[in-house]
Amino acid sequence: MEFRLRVWRQAGPDAPGGFEEHVVREVKEDMSILEVLDQLNQDLVKEGRDPIAYESDCREGICGVCGLVINGVPHGEQRKTTTCELRMRHFFPGQTISVEPFRAGAMPIIKDLMVDRTALDHLIHSGGYVSTRIGSSPEANTIPVAKQDQEEAMDAAECIGCGACAAACPNASAMLFIGAKVSHLAKLPQGRPEAARRVMAMSGRMQELGFGNCSNHYECQAVCPKDIDVKFISRLNREFIKALFKKRN
Ligand code: SF4
Ligand code: FES
């Protein structure tokens, strides 16, 4: 198969950017869009041209670093799919495919399709962890956790921190991302003691880093490769209100 790629090229954070068109031939239907970019880069290198910068690591939907905007949609139009798992069989032969970086003020472009995701790490550092002593493994097994709580915690824990939710949101909000972290830990007894401190810290840090607030567009859930539910944003809001009361009393 053959495809025409319109790829965003930008030499650096402050350089002007624009689309560059390339035809990629001999594409197999089981190749991922990243493998098509790999093939294109090999051709560019052979021609002595600057290869396209983009990120990837696991290439199996786990690490969260590969996010690109494909035909205007973060991670592409295929539901519950990361960029690295997006296969060419989902496109029409000969189709023109636009490939852009995630766009959100808090995740600036470094070069071409590569963005700086440090803000997501800062959010985790602000509270997305458990620092209380929870004992050794056998003791942890003696703490009963209701099945529904376990399942909800594990649903939230599926977030891979890719940032697509913020890239899709018109407010560049990271509330689905922090909602998943806050809910995952608040649902488990090990995370409960720090729940109030965590939600206040993560919500405050989100504002400082330049992410916006949720105004119920639901674009975040629509593009999330792990189908994280917007109910976790409601949970985040409830945890935040509880923490406010706790602080005042
Ligand atoms: S909530 Fe979904 S879209 Fe947002 S960072 Fe987590 S996995 Fe990515
Ligand atoms: S490269 Fe790891 S999720 Fe895509």
Image: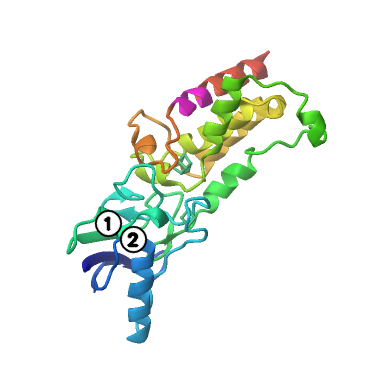
- Residue labelled with disc 2: 30
Q: CA distance from mark 2 to mark 1?
A: 6 Å
- Identify the residue at image location x=33%, y=80%: 43
- Identify the residue at image location x=50%, y=53%: 117
Q: Name the image quarter holding residue 221.
A: top left
Rendered position, 125 above or below 236: below
Is disc 2 placed on a helix, strand or loop? loop
| CB-based contact (under 8 Å), mark 2 and mark 1 | yes
Left or right position of 102 against 21: right
Residue 247 among magenta residues? no
Q: Which residues are magenta?
A: 231-236
- Residue labelled with disc 1: 89
Q: Name the image quarter holding residue 85.
A: bottom left
Main SS, magenta residues: helix
- Residue 126 placed where, x, y %? 63, 41
Q: 4 or 198: which is nearer to us?
A: 4
Q: Earlier in the sequence, mark 2 or mark 1?
A: 2
- Identify the residue at image location x=37%, y=75%: 41
Q: 78 or 5: which is nearer to us?
A: 78
- Residue 154 placed where, x, y %? 57, 33
